[in-house]
């Protein structure tokens, strides 16, 4: 098991968040533990959101001390919180080894959606995304993913998070075992108790990756980042993707729909002059008509230092209209959090930039 650990008394201590729901059982061997100790600690960590052992008031003092000598409760620390005027909240976390990740809470009508990262950086390197600029740094552990949920919950007060999407930094299928472990903890009634229908995994969609996701016996939603309607255009937009095979990817997605009944979301980040022309709309329609998909058009959220432009609203509307006329269901995502720069990976880049820290301190 890959574990998040923290420094303590000269050595690293593993984080309890990295234990699976069943894995807490090993705490029964701690000095002073009783048979019910694992369940008590699990509830404190996952359900009651304790951040240190002192908060676990129904454990004896000796047991709390013994636990704290071997374990930390969480591995990461919230570094910054950026709140947009539209209510979007970017959360920047420093991990035990100093790496930085971000998660974003996006309010929309009755929903509050948490966008989760699965890796530090990303190997896919989509040309429009800040997460891929520095390449892939490392995978997150399951606990580091679960902690993003716990931190977002801490920061959300009375407004519960309703939906959870793996659409932040990283390609989830490149870190599948940790992502699946985290989803198991999120979904378990003894863990965070989040219904599978509220969890979405977004993938760049290699056919083999889609099939691997389809084998996970938790019926979360699947989203495919298609972005462009041809393999050649996708390979240009997503240079780390390798060979694109849209036909096989959509076939694998169709198979998952047949097995689960869960419709697939197809995402396309829309870029001015790149994939927002009428011909792109017709090519998307040719590709997707008749499939059990819902297309989510995402007007590009500007990223510092990238020489791209957000699409004009009328071009996004034209794409929507072409798809709708072909019978393809489509939604358009409203740009969110632009005043605080929550485009994927951007908060992390800024947190890593020393001049940004100086600027922050001057405010
Ligand atoms: S959009 Fe997703 S897959 Fe592409 S570089 Fe960013 S994090 Fe990676």
Image (cartoon, helix red, strand yellow):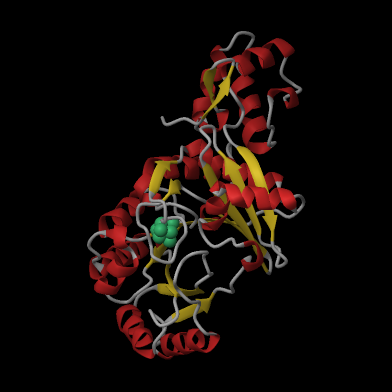
Residue in front for this viewpoint, 330 or 239? 239
Q: Position of residue 205 (x, y in %)?
A: 33, 61
Quadrant housing the C terminus: bottom right
Q: Position of residue 231 (x, y in %)?
A: 25, 71
Viewed as shown, does residue 288 lie left or right of 163?
left
Which residue appears at 22% of the width and 62% of the height? Answer: 243
Ligand 1: image quarter? bottom left
Q: Is residue 198 above or below residue 318?
A: above
The number of numbered discs placed on residues in the rendered structure image is 0
Which residue appears at 40% of the width and 83% of the height? Answer: 273
Q: Position of residue 87 (x, y in %)?
A: 71, 63
Q: Position of residue 73 (x, y in %)?
A: 62, 28
Which residue appears at 59% of the width and 15% of the height? Answer: 9
- The quadrant in which residue 222 appears is bottom left
Residue in front for this viewpoint, 336 or 51? 336
Residue in front for this viewpoint, 115 or 352? 352
Query: Could one spot residue 196 in this view of the protein?
Result: yes
Viewed as shown, does residue 37 lie left or right of 210?
right
Q: Is residue 97 above or below residue 216?
A: above
Quadrant housing the N terminus: top left
Query: Could one spot residue 36 in this view of the protein?
Result: no
- The quadrant in which residue 177 appears is top left
Viewed as shown, does residue 241 lie left or right of 319?
left
């Amino acid at each position: 098991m890959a574990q998040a650990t923290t420094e303590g008394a000269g050595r690293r201590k593993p984080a309890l968040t990295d234990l699976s729901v069943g894995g807490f059982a090993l705490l029964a061997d701690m000095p002073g533990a009783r048979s019910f100790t694992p369940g008590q600690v699990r509830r404190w960590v996952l359900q009651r959101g304790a951040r240190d052992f002192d908060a676990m008031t129904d454990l004896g003092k000796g047991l709390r001390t013994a636990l704290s000598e071997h374990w930390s409760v969480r591995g990461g620390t919230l570094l910054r919180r950026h709140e947009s005027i539209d209510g979007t909240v970017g959360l920047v976390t420093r991990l035990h080894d100093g790496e930085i990740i971000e998660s974003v809470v996006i309010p929309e009508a009755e929903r509050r959606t948490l966008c989760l990262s699965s890796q530090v950086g990303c190997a896919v390197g989509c040309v429009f995304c800040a997460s891929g600029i520095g390449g892939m740094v490392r995978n997150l552990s399951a606990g580091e993913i679960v902690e993003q949920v716990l931190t977002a919950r801490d920061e959300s007060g009375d407004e519960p998070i309703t939906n959870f999407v793996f659409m932040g930094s990283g390609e989830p299928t490149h870190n599948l075992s940790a992502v699946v472990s985290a989803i198991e903890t999120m979904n378990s009634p003894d863990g965070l108790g989040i219904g599978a229908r509220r969890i979405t995994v977004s993938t760049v969609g290699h056919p083999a990756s889609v099939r691997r996701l389809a084998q996970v016996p938790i019926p979360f939603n699947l989203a495919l980042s298609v972005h462009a309607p041809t393999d050649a255009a996708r390979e240009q937009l997503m240079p780390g993707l390798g060979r694109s095979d849209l036909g096989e990817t959509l076939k694998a997605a169709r198979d998952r729909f047949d097995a689960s009944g869960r419709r697939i979301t197809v995402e396309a980040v829309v870029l001015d002059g790149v994939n927002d022309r009428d011909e792109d709309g017709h090519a998307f329609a040719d590709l997707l008509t008749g499939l059990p998909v819902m297309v989510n058009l995402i007007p590009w959220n500007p990223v510092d230092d990238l020489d791209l432009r957000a699409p004009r609203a009328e071009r996004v509307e034209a794409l929507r209209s072409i798809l709708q006329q072909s019978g393809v269901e489509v939604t358009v995502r409203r740009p969110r959090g632009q005043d605080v720069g929550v485009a994927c990976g951007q908060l992390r880049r800024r947190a890593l930039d020393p001049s940004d820290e100086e600027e922050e301190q001057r405010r």
